[in-house]
Amino acid sequence: MAEVLLEFSFEKTSSDPKERGCLIIGSVLNFSMVTYDNFAEKLQPSVDSKTFNLVLRSLSESDSCNIWLNQVVACSLPSNASRHNSPCHPHVLKSLVKSYLPAGNAVIVVVCEKKDVFASGCAIARCFPLFSLKTNSSAKQSKKITVEFVTTDGQQVTDDDIKCLTSTAESIRLAAKIVDIPCNIMHTDNFLEEIRKVGKELGIEPTIIQGEELRERGFGGIYGVGKAAIHQPALAILSHTPKDATRTFAWVGKGIVYDTGGLSIKGKTAMPGMKRDCGGAAAILGAFRAAVKQGFRENLHGVFCLAENAVGPNSTRPDDIHTFYSGKTVEINNTDAEGRLVLADGVYYARKDLKADVVLDMATLTGAQGIATGRYHGGLLTNKESWEIAAVQAGRKSGDLLHPLPYCPELHFCEFSSVVADMKNSVKNRDNAQSSCAGLFIGAHLGFDYPGAWIHVDMASPVESGERATGYGVALLLTLFGQSSSNSLLKIVASSLPAKDAD
């Protein structure tokens, strides 16, 4: 895989198709509003206006045409989307880029309305992962991909929009890179280095609690999961606190850099791929970086719960009882239900120490999520209906799709009952709303009496596609909280942010 330099441009760039290929993507409706003149500087002298306009008008829905020697290709997107899909079809756009992008240096031109620019740009960013240790010559080559937009609603893409797209694409690729890197490289200490790098870039010094200090300060969940590993568990916090902020948001990420299952060990077919169990923390790191760079106006905390669920003499055993930062006691009946343990400490820290009025946690939490909401939609659990509506809308607008899970602690939390502790960590009945129950374990430590909004995102399935991380979650968070940004493009895609006292 060649190293890809990805850049966005609001100005038209010129080139001969012999030197730089051109991929043009849009819906049939949007193609009907443009002509050869919108692309001439990229097509001459190889493609004439008569040929190009004929091709553009002849494309049907979900169609493609190789206009000139695989160096100029036009592809059309589906015209309609169901109510649980994104109207601009980012998953199809990604597939078209991966299938039809000309070799070598190339330009991608997306023909769309201004409201679809953000999701389309994010979809393209997901096509170009950063991590590879391949040693063949083709893997060492580099190429430049330029992305431009032709808007059909009269609203032009600005330099400020391009800055937003650039930082977002960088952050999506950063999140995907962290998830793609195996644990012999991306262990907890190196994840902390990634956090420090982002902090240095933003001028923020992270707070880090690691190893025995976790135990001493009462973080029994994070410490209990990671204490058997060579690289010690950690809780890390990045805090952005602008002067005139009126609200405090905390994004809490599950960062299990590898999950063997612990003593409740996974089988040989279930364990490969568990390097991706840090996807929630990686997404929050990327989103935090992009949000602050785009002028986030409220208090924002990124909370990273990092551990390796390893097997060793110090491993937590089934039947052990741990005391968590919330003060609650948990009887461990499944060491492979570890993500909820680290997040339980993280969300209560967000409530108690950070005084957050909105706590969002993101995690590759349950395999059941893929059964409940599928490969493309993350599972959403929240105590506030207003945030459920806003989050689902943000998913459709960003391309990081979400679908609600039942929030009903009075019917589901009984699954965790224990005769010797406040709760067990794994359910009695795995057929009873398993993804909802897993989320409720986290919510129980935040407190069902928590007066603020709690949003839980389970993204176990959409974190990867085709053995590659997707960077899922970065675009979602930027869109969901976009009204708190100073960037105009994010405000276009963002829904109204629910008020503090909204139900």
Image (cartoon, rainbow, N blue to C red):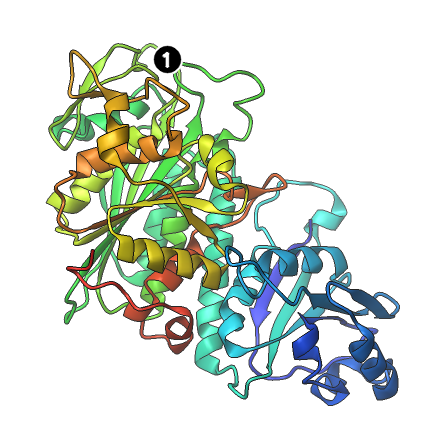
User: Do we see residue 345 in this rendering?
Assistant: no
Lateral position of residue 315 relative to residue 465, left or right: left
How many labels, in total?
A: 1
Q: Is residue 319 left or right of residue 489?
A: left
* Residue pictured at 38% horizontal, 24% vertical: 309
Q: Residues within 10 Å of mark 1 (few under 14, many from 20)?
A: few
Q: Nearer the viewer, residue 222 or 443?
A: 443
The residue lying toward the viewer, choosing from 364 and 81, is 81
What x and y, as percent, mark residue 267? 53, 16
Residue 253, given in percent of the width and then of the height, sits at: 33, 43
Q: Quadrant of residue 71?
A: bottom right
Q: Quadrant of residue 111?
A: bottom right
Report whether 328 appears left or right of 114: left
**Nearest the eye: 218 or 84:** 84
Task: Tell me the residue that label 1 is attached to.
Answer: 312
Q: Image point 84% across, 67% down: which residue?
A: 66
The residue type indicated by label 1 comes to Gly
Q: Is residue 337 visible?
A: yes
As displayed, is residue 278 above or below residue 227? below
- Place of residue 328 in the rendered image (x, y in percent of width and height, measured from the top left): 14, 26
Query: What residue is at 67 percent from the left and 77 percent from the top?
Result: 29
Determine the secondary structure under disc 1: loop
Tell me: residue 391, above or below residue 349.
Answer: below
Image spot of residue 158 (x, y percent):
48, 83
Please state, as top left, top right, bottom left or bottom right, where the C terminus lies in the image.
bottom left
Residue 275 sits above or below residue 35 on the image:
above
